[in-house]
Image (spheres, helix red, strand yellow):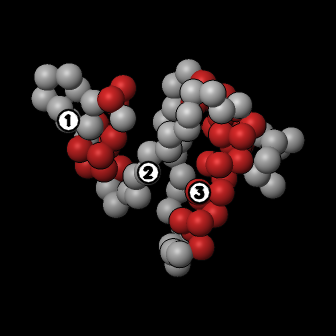
Amino acid sequence: MLSWTHRQSGALWLMDFLDKDLGDANIYTFGYPSFASIGSAARDLIQSFEIERSSRADFDTPIVFIASGTGGLVVKQVQSPTGYYR
């Protein structure tokens, strides 16, 4: 989470500011070990969503992904029509 945190103020902009811009948003973070493959990280992300969504009744809330670097490739794999999430 350090990469999303302002060095001087310590503000984590994903949680401290983004929610104010998006309104009633559910904000989650997802991390994976540096040695994980893109495919295994994508499967772990999908599993995390399935667990979270199974405990909620609110399925109308849109999902917005914010990612950088390899995390962007993980999200792309999750969203790919030939990827893991079908």
Above or below for 43 versus 73: below
Q: CA distance from mark 2 to mark 1?
A: 16 Å
Work out whether residue 79 can be spotted: yes
Work out whether residue 21 can be spotted: no
Residues at circles 2 and 1 in contact by the CB criterion of under 8 Å? no
Residue tagged by mark 3? 48
Residue tagged by mark 1? 11
The numbered mark, 2 or 3, whose residue comes first in the sequence reads: 2
Closer to the camera in the image, 53 or 1: 1
Closer to the camera in the image, 32 or 4: 32
Q: Nearer the viewer, mark 2 or mark 3?
A: 3
Q: Nearer the viewer, mark 3 or mark 1?
A: 3
* Few, some or many residues within 10 Å of mark 2 (<14, 14–19, 20+): few
Q: At label 1, which amino acid type do we have?
A: Ala
Q: Residue furthest left?
A: 9
Helix, strand or loop status at disc 1 = loop
Residues at circles 2 and 3 in contact by the CB criterion of under 8 Å? yes
Residue tagged by mark 2? 28
* Few, some or many residues within 10 Å of mark 1 (<14, 14–19, 20+): few
Quadrant hosting residue 25:
bottom left
Looking at the image, which residue is at 65% across and 49% down?
A: 44
Q: Position of residue 34 (x, y in %)?
A: 57, 27
Q: CA distance from mark 3 to mark 1?
A: 25 Å
Above or below for 65 versus 69: below
Q: At label 3, which amino acid type do we have?
A: Ser
The numbered mark, 2 or 1, whose residue comes first in the sequence reads: 1
Residues at circles 3 and 1 in contact by the CB criterion of under 8 Å? no
